[in-house]
Amino acid sequence: IDLSLHIKQFGIVILGDSSVGKSSLLHRFTEGTFDESRQSPLGIDFKVHNMNFDPDVVIKLLLWDTAGQERFRSICKSYMRNSVGCILMFDVSQRQTFDRVGSWHQEVLDYVKPNPMFFVLVGHKCDLAVGRQVRKSEGDALAKKLNMLAYLEVSTKENINVREVFETLTRGIYNLFQQGKIPTRDDWQGLTQSADTQMQKWCLHLSLKQTKTEKSNTKLKLFLVQYE
């Protein structure tokens, strides 16, 4: 029985204006909690999260939370270059953050060339009963116009669509890679793949053996045999 485990590593960067909720989104997804007092990172925050799609495939997500302030933009660019996916966020209660999505999108594309980048557009604070300044239909239309994988509205406070954001982006990238539409290169770390060498060395074998002294009992023996 071949138990080799294939690991794919996706770099994912979270971008958008300052205070749109990037840190809250990442914290809710990786830690499962909401902290209203959580501050934006001074430059970059980093998390690792594993996702399982196929039985023998693990997707390791390298998640980069970037500060939206202009003074940190040069720091963020280095993480853009070694990412394959981007969560581009705005706040549905702040129209100006939506209006700047196009410039964020173009800046990323210009900087990562010739490497590919795949986007999901995220409208944060969809739980607000009043104060919305961006309609859902506008988000849908912009995501389609910019050829993004999807538009989702989320609330980190109420835990609405948080996991779906990361699953949608990861699944989209994975499917495109499986279709041969995302090349890999030695000098690009946005998407890498490897096999778990430890798992490849070992295989589980089951053997049933009837003993002479205990004829009524069947013993199940587990052998770990290292590949030659």
Image (cartoon, rainbow, N blue to C red):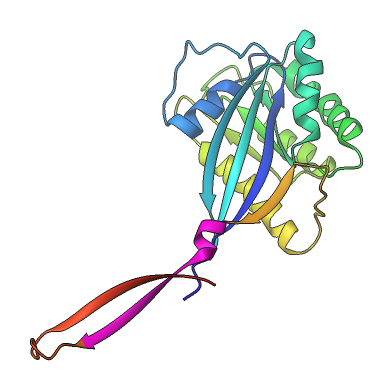
Q: Residue at x 76, y 40 (%)?
A: 143
Q: Quadrant of residue 224?
A: bottom left
Q: Is residue 190 visible?
A: yes
> Would residue 139 be found to the left or right of residue 227 on screen?
right
Q: Is residue 45 left or right of residue 110?
A: left
Viewer-proximal residue, 153 or 228? 228
Q: Is residue 138 left or right of residue 9?
A: right
Give, as a single range, the part of the protein colored magenta: 196-209
Asked where in the image residue 208 lies, by quadrant, the reply is bottom left
Question: Residue at (53%, 49%) from the top-left corner?
Answer: 51
Q: Position of residue 1 (x, y in %)?
A: 46, 76
Instruction: Look at the picture and state if 180 lies above or below 112.
Output: below
Q: Is residue 77 magenta?
A: no
x, y percent for residue 26: 55, 29
Work out which quarter of the rendered image holds the C terminus and state it: bottom right
The x, y position of residue 149, in whole percent, is 73, 47
Residue 194 picture location, percent across and down: 65, 55
Q: Is 206 contained in the magenta span?
A: yes
- Most foreground residue, 15 or 131: 15
Q: Is residue 198 depicted above or below 146 in this figure?
A: below
**Residue 123 image-quadrant placement:** top right
